[in-house]
Amino acid sequence: MIGLDTNVLVRYVMQDDVRQSAKATQLIESLSQESKGFVSLVALIESIWVFECCYELKKPQVVMTIEQLLRSRELLIESSESVWKALRVFKSATADFADCMIGAASNQVGCATVMTFDRAASKLNGMTLLD
């Protein structure tokens, strides 16, 4: 197994740099179920931020991208069960994916609530506004 950094994921998904995208594609398409690529939560969340902020992808495009990564048999996504839960919430939430992920991860370890100053995040189930 090999780890995949944010920039490799972004180049593969966005195909925006001829040289680096070709290398990222070659690498990712060489992965298999026996020799997987590992995507950490940090790399996933950072990639989503890049997709939204730098490439201005809209939520449906981001959701589709995350789903494709999660369904790939050649990738191991860290805490994939929590990522699926966060994705389900993200689809209809006004909060960003990182906040949805914080809520899902906190719920998975048994937190009663997540305290936040973020009003949009506080509307998520399991999050409380610290006012």
Image: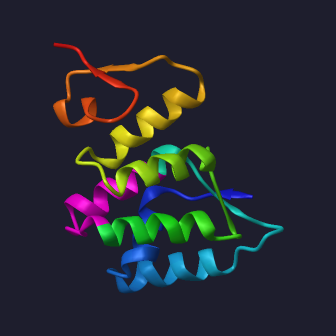
Judged from this view, the residue extending furthest toward the right is 34
Whether residue 78 is visible here, answered yes or no, is: no
**Number of residue marks:** 0
Residue 85: percent from left, percent from top: 52, 47
**Image quadrant in which the N terminus is located:** bottom right
Residue, x 59% and y 82% (percent of image)? 26
Q: Residue furthest top?
A: 131
23, above or below 99, in the image: below
Q: Residue at x 36, y 51 (%)?
A: 90
Q: Quadrant of the C terminus?
A: top left
Q: Is residue 110 above or below residue 9?
A: above
Give the quarter of the image for residue 19. bottom left
Q: Nearer the viewer, residue 100 or 52?
A: 100
Please tell me which residue lies in front, 88 or 66: 88
Colour treatment of the image: rainbow
Q: Position of residue 52 (x, y in %)?
A: 25, 61
Magenta region, residue range: 44-59
Is 34 colored magenta in this rendering? Answer: no
Q: Is residue 14 left or right of residue 105?
A: left
Which residue is located at x 35 percent, y 48 percent? 97
Tell which of 88 and 57 is nearer to you: 88
Q: Left or right: where does residue 120 sit relative to residue 109?
A: left
When asked about the image quadrant of residue 32, the answer is bottom right
Residue 74, percent from left and from top: 70, 70
- Residue at image position (19%, 67%) is 56
Q: Is residue 59 visible?
A: yes
Magenta span: predominant SS is helix
